[in-house]
Image (cartoon, rainbow, N blue to C red):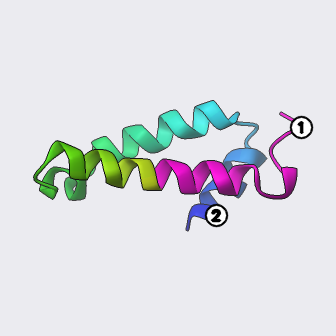
């Protein structure tokens, strides 16, 4: 899923920053995020998701031409 999201964002010409903003927005507006009870748990979850997206976006230097 993360790889599909990153591939689609690169195909659309998005920068890594645009991807991160969109991912954060999606996470914060999701019902699942509201079910996480503590701020530290939400922050940890968001950090994992964003880190996975950044790693995938730049995997093998694939996002460096932007």
Q: Nearer the viewer, residue 22 or 12?
A: 22
Q: State the image quarter where residue 60 is shown.
A: bottom right
Q: Is residue 64 magenta?
A: yes
Residue name at image x 58 percent, y 52 percent: 53
Q: Residue furthest right?
A: 65
Question: Circle 1: is it few (<14), some (14-19), or many (20+) Cα within 10 Å?
Answer: few
Element under disc 2: helix
Residue name at image x 54 percent, y 50 percent: 51
Q: Is residue 45 above or below residue 13?
A: below
Cα distance between the residues tagged 1 and 2? 19 Å
Q: Which comes sooner in the sequence, label 1 or label 2?
A: 2
Residue name at image x 76 percent, y 37 percent: 13
Task: Give me the disc on residue 65.
Answer: 1
Q: State the image quarter where residue 59 is shown.
A: bottom right
Q: Is residue 31 above or below residue 15?
A: below
Q: Is residue 44 magenta?
A: no
In the image, is 36 to the left or to the right of 56?
A: left
User: Which quarter shows the C terminus?
Assistant: top right
The span picked out in magenta is: 49-66
Q: Which residue is mark 2?
A: 4
- Residue 23 is situated, as x and y percent measured from the top left of the image, at 47, 44
Residue name at image x 67 percent, y 37 percent: 16
């Amino acid at each position: 899923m993360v790889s599909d999201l990153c591939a689609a964002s690169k195909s659309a010409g998005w920068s890594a920053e645009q991807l991160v903003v969109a991912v954060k927005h999606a996470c914060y507006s999701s019902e699942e995020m509201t079910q996480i009870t503590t701020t530290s748990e939400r922050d940890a979850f968001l950090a994992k998701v964003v880190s996975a997206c950044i790693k995938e976006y730049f995997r093998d230097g694939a996002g460096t031409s932007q």
